[in-house]
Amino acid sequence: MCNIPVVAITGSVGKTSTKDMIASVLSQKYKVLKTQGNYNNEIGMPFTLLSLKDEEVMVLEMGMNSFGEISLLSRIAKPDVAVITNIGTAHIGLLGSRENILKAKLEILEGMKIPRVIINYDNDLLNEWYEKEKNNYNIITYGTQQGSKVLGQNAVFHENGSTCEAVIDSKTYNVHIPVGGEHFVSNSLCALSVAKIFEIPVEEAIK
């Protein structure tokens, strides 16, 4: 346990790239310590915790292969903000179903005192979970579906990057993402959601 804010990230895919984008956004205001590479398990994560020096925010990636693993990581790190990027089919052979993968990923909440959660509203299972639990947790949704609190729209994809409009608190911002791929639009919306919690101006986060 540490005395600085901790952002924890999990998901079937995209954890590392999302972690890097979140850390980049937070670095506009804070000195950030982030998981190096994919050191995201019960062995790797403590290395990050032990390397803490004078950083002001920590961004931790949490991976798993079975039930109980993220629960342990969450109870060690005690995150202030939890990010779940998606629920896919990775580890489905071990856990049996996407519903079980969702259950395992939601263990990230178990170490939190006041759960503040950021989820991908475009993911079907996370969307369903949000509709059931939106009155029980402080949840920010992001995605391209109408109803997302951080909404991406009018995305245009180029060979070396993409652009989109991000609608946040009824204001529209133009976002340029200097890497190609639809999933990086989603990752950028996630990073803007974290910026919202940490009160980083949208314009600074987009930079």
Image: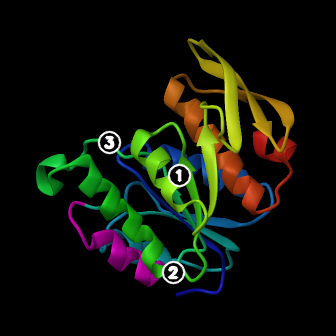
Looking at the rendered image, the quarter that the C terminus falls into is top right
Image quarter for residue 5?
Answer: bottom right
Is residue 150 visible in this depiction of the protein?
A: yes
- Pointers 2 and 1 in contact (C-beta within 8 Å): no
Which callout, 3 or 1, points to the residue nearer the camera?
1
Looking at the image, tell me whether mark 2 or mark 1 is earlier in sequence order: 2
Residue 140 sits inside the magenta stretch: no
Disc 1 is placed on an element classified as helix
- Pointers 3 and 1 in contact (C-beta within 8 Å): no
Image x and y of residue 2, in percent = 58, 86
- Is residue 61 shown above or below 203? below
Kind of residue at disc 1: Glu
> What is the distance, in whole Å, between disc 3 and disc 1 at their CAs?
19 Å
Residue range (magenta): 65-77
Is residue 207 visible in this depiction of the protein?
A: no
Q: Which mark is residue 78?
A: 2
The coloring applied to the image is rainbow
Looking at the image, tell me whether mark 3 or mark 1 is earlier in sequence order: 3
Q: Is residue 190 left or right of residue 97?
A: right
- Pointers 3 and 2 in contact (C-beta within 8 Å): no
Mark 3 crowd level (few <14, some 14–19, many ≥20, 10 Å Cα): some
Residue picked out by circle 3: 88
Image x and y of residue 172, in percent = 84, 31
Q: Nearer the viewer, residue 176 or 70?
A: 70
Q: Which mark is residue 131?
A: 1
Disc 2 is placed on an element classified as loop
Disc 3 is placed on an element classified as loop
Q: Nearer the viewer, residue 42 or 156?
A: 156
Q: Residue at x 28, y 52 (%)?
A: 99
Image x and y of residue 95, in percent = 17, 56
Image x and y of residue 102, in percent = 34, 55
